[in-house]
Image (cartoon, helix red, strand yellow):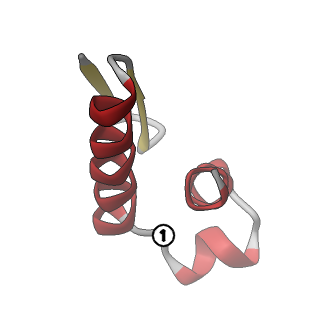
Amino acid sequence: MMQIGVETVWQVIDGSFSGDKKTMKQLKMLLREIYLYYGVTAEDIKNEMERYKLLLATLCS
């Protein structure tokens, strides 16, 4: 199971997933691709916005 949340006012995306080990690995890669596609702006990085921090956390996990 995978859940993706998109909050349009604050422009935040989050996700969670569960399943057996193989499924979890696949869903983790999919969530990572979603975060990479969603991207961050130069302003997000400069101001260390939540959107940027969430991307870093996802890529580091």
Three-letter residue code for mark 1: Val
Is residue 37 visible from the viewing direction of this image? yes
Picture coordinates of residue 8 (x, y %)?
A: 32, 36
Q: Nearer the viewer, residue 33 or 54?
A: 33
Q: Nearer the viewer, residue 48 or 55?
A: 55
Rendered image quadrant of residue 23: top left
Q: In which quadrant is the N terminus drawn?
A: top left
* Residue plotted at (48% across, 69% down): 40
Rendered image quadrant of residue 45: bottom right
- Along the horizontal axis of the image, is 1 left or right of 39? left
Categorize mark 1 by other alpha carbons within 10 Å: few (<14), some (14-19), many (20+): some
Residue 13 position (above or below residue 49)? above
- Along the horizontal axis of the image, is 5 left or right of 46? left
The local secondary structure at tag 1 comes to loop
* Residue plotted at (66% across, 48% down): 50
Q: Nearer the viewer, residue 7 or 55?
A: 55
* Residue plotted at (39% across, 28% down): 21
Looking at the image, how many numbered discs can be counted on the residues? 1
Residue 36 position (above or below residue 35)? below
* Residue at image mark 1: 40
* Residue plotted at (75% across, 68% down): 47
Is residue 6 visible from the viewing direction of this image? no
